[in-house]
Amino acid sequence: MLRIDLEGHFQEKIDREERIEAKDWMPEAYRKTLIRQISQHAHSEIVGMLPEGNWISRAPSLKRKAILLAKIQDEAGHGLYLYSACETLGIDRDELLNELHTGKAKYSSIFNYPALTWADMGAIGWLVDGAAIMNQIPLCRTSYGPYSRAMIRICKEESFHQRQGYEIMLTLSRGSTVQKNMAQDALNRWWWPSIMMFGPNDSDSTHSAQSIKWKIKRFSNDELRQRFIDMTVPQAELIGLKIPDPDLKWNEERKSYDFGKINWDEFWNVVKGNGPCNKQRLRDRVKAHEDGAWVRDAAVAYAEKKRSGRVN
Amino acid sequence: MKNWPLFEIFIRSKSGLNHKHVGSLHAADAQMAIENARDVYTRRQEGISIWVVESKYISASDPVDSDPFFEPALDKIYRHPTFYDLPDEVKHM
Ligand SMILES: [Fe+2]
Ligand SMILES: [Fe+2]
């Protein structure tokens, strides 16, 4: 009886658009769903640093290098905001990292594709950050307070990520034939994985209905995907690049683009760990964590020493 | 991060304003928390002053009791200026 009242009260609060805070009562399933979603999101931010980090030392100019560094640093910050939000739900950082490093937790599959050329830095900013922003803007109003506040901060910082990516594509598309081809090739490789970022079709999405009822999610995967496509196609046209989808066509009746069939076998295959870079990403992540162990230990030893007054 | 305690971070965005809670982070000590808070929370000049406090030192009211706890303020509407009916002629009071 009491349990039912608590759940009823909780849902009413959500329906009134009140935020749930860390110490408020919440159903166990709500807590679990959030831990899964926020930690996946946090992991995606920091694993997402890897394909771009690969290009810092090879950026074509000092200006591009500084921009890329700033973007990647932002992503590290996003990871931190999200890990902190997740920890308010009663799980600690070590446990979260351990789940990532043992492959138990997932991160966005998009980062299991390689960044082969400089144009990929353009395509990633434009498409991958673009799709992420499309997903993240509604999350600024998600029902869990700490998550929503983290998302507001993240969205503010994200806006330059997409613009710098699109500007790279714009510059390449105005360059030599080789540069223009490089941009087109990057679009060809990143387009489909980017539209897969919104997740499975609504009919196959297991968590969607409950998440929408709890107002963790506000829009379905297919709605967001459609919006992203409608927004991106004209941007590609503007810089003379072609979206690699022969079935892409404006539908006057729907006032939206129809698009081709998504290769969900590829999607699930990458999710299951068989994408081109899954093993490399995880290995790099674990190595970075292990290589940093002595720094963490040294910082603790120094802090203890300071506390005991042996240094000042 | 087992031995790195959690710190709550408060930032004053410009002079004249309160420090405001912005989030939390783990650090070995307060000095490191301040430096890391600068790196993550003020990359775009969002602050001119940072406070950090170890999360374990914060005591909070209990949300379960929040209704009765804040109830005493509920029926004292005479604490608000709008409670008082004054003639329209009195313009600014
Ligand atoms: Fe991000
Ligand atoms: Fe980003």
Image: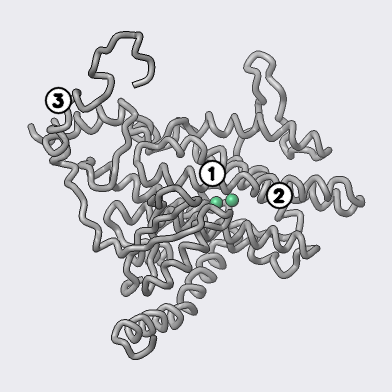
The label number, if any, that marks residue B75 in the structure image: 3
- In the foreground, A236 or B34: B34
Q: Amino acid at mark 1?
A: Cys
Q: Amino acid at mark 2?
A: Gln
Which residue lies under the disc numbered 1? A155
Give x and y (percent) for residue B30: 37, 71
- In the foreground, B68 or A44: B68
The answer to whether marks 2 and 1 sit on the same chain is yes
CA–CA distance in space, label 3 to label 2: 55 Å
Query: Up-down: is A49 above or below A304?
Result: above
CA–CA distance in space, label 3 to label 1: 41 Å
CA–CA distance in space, label 2 to label 1: 15 Å
* Residue B88 in view (yes/no): yes
**Do callouts 2 and 1 mark residues in contact (Cβ within 8 Å)?**
no
Residue drawn at point x = 39 percent, y = 54 percent? B23
Give x and y (percent) for residue A103: 42, 62
Which sits earlier in the primary sequence, circle 2 or circle 1?
1
Q: Residues within 10 Å of mark 1 (few under 14, many from 20)?
A: some
Give x and y (percent) for residue A27: 22, 41
Which residue lies under the disc numbered 2? A164
In the image, the residue with mark 1 has its CB under 8 Å from the nearest atom of ligand 1: no
Residue drawn at point x = 71 percent, y = 29 percent? A248
Instruction: Describe the element under mark 3 as helix, strand or loop.
Output: loop
Could you tell whether A217 is left or right of A65 in the image?
left
Q: Place residue A261 in its image quadrant.
A: top right
In the image, the residue with mark 2 has its CB under 8 Å from the nearest atom of ligand 2: no
Give x and y (percent) for residue B44: 58, 54
Q: Quadrant of the N terminus of chain A?
A: top left
Instruction: Describe the element under mark 1 as helix, strand or loop.
Output: helix
Q: Quadrant of the C terminus of chain A?
A: bottom left
Q: Amino acid at mark 3?
A: Asp
